[in-house]
Amino acid sequence: MLRLACLALLWGSSFLWIKFSLRGFSPVQIVLIRLTLGALVLAPIALARGMRFPTGAKVWGHLFAAALVANAIPYTLFGIGEKTVDSNVAGVINATTPLWTVLIAFLAGTDRKVSAWRGLGLALGFAGTVLIFSPWESANEIASWGGLAVLAASASYGVSYVYMGKFLSGRGIPPIMLSASQLAAGAVWMLLALPFGGLAAPHWRFDALVAVMILGVFGTGIAYVLNYRLIGDEGPTIASTNTYLLPVVAVVLGALVVSEPVTVSMIAGMLVVLAGVFLVQRKPAAKPEPATAKT
């Protein structure tokens, strides 16, 4: 639960950092910088600990595929979406990620054991997110091209959790090296995309530069190590529930940092979210072993 909370804290602030980053950089530039920084932070640490980059075309093929659906596509779509959609609306749409993960895991045959408690937890998590952000007040933003971009990004995240859980975690590659390799692969994808949306001269604003550096080092590099550990230890569905904690982080940071008001519906939504995450994390009770007859 602690790792889930740390990951939610790192990713929950990302919507704010993306907004600041857009003041100076295009979406493609932001994603290229954050992926490159994430890889540059993690790779030297992994190499200093005696780890080696993965070998084999098959492993790298999976890494490039994971980087496409987990990094290059959704990160870019979030940057595009947040040009016209507020961060709170992006947050509530992003909360569909665990639902996408459950659906894709079921269709892929990797996780068809969704218990009643876990299903209730997923539903409560989404309902709590809706309460926090009250999207009915921004319905026109949700039903927009920006809203659709964020929805597509959330679906891509759902694909990535299942893909990474099936093809990358559990291969014996340390999470820190797995993360560094995937982020490096993602940076290569963004280099290829640079001519299509990243050639405009950036505005070298201090706030935008600091924001994109925080996104790269903390919201990408460190966060992805935690993400791989969660997927490997708990499975893709439980790992994806960190999405439900992101709006809780956003509301708390908004109140503490910029004195944003906290309403009764926000508090109620946060309690519902926490209850939902608890139910998803709940371990089923072990069945008692049948008693053996004494002779």
Image (cartoon, rainbow, N blue to C red):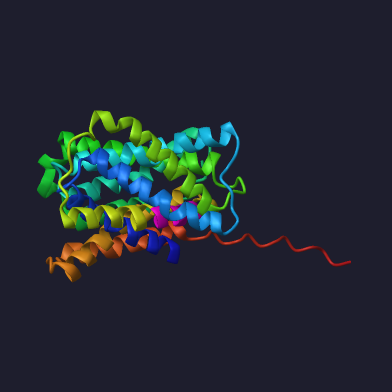
Picture quadrant where residue 8 is located: bottom left
User: Looking at this rendering, what residue extends furthest in the top direction?
Assistant: 196
Q: How many marks?
A: 0
Is residue 252 within the magenta segment?
A: no
Q: Give the range drawn in magenta.
A: 221-230
Look at the image and tell me whether residue 243 can be seen: yes
At 56% from the left and 62% from the top, the residue drawn is 285
| Nearer to the camera, 75 or 199 | 199
* Vertical position of residue 88 compared to residue 75: above or below: below
| Nearer to the camera, 280 or 245 | 245
At 70% from the left and 61% from the top, the residue drawn is 289
- Give left or right: position of 179 versus 94: right
- Give left or right: position of 57 versus 275: right
User: Residue 293 placed where, x, y %?
Assistant: 82, 64
User: Residue 150 placed where, x, y %?
Assistant: 25, 40
Figure quadrant of the N terminus = bottom left
User: Residue 138 placed where, x, y %?
Assistant: 11, 46
Most frequent secondary structure within the magenta stretch: helix
* Vertical position of residue 277 compared to residue 181: above or below: below
* Vertical position of residue 261 compared to residue 92: above or below: below
User: Residue 184 placed where, x, y %?
Assistant: 43, 42
* Vertical position of residue 156 compared to residue 138: above or below: above
Figure quadrant of the C terminus = bottom right
| Nearer to the camera, 141 or 289 | 141
| Nearer to the camera, 33 or 157 | 33
Look at the image and tell me whether residue 240 can be seen: no
At 23% from the left and 40% from the top, the residue drawn is 27
Picture quadrant where residue 209 is located: bottom left
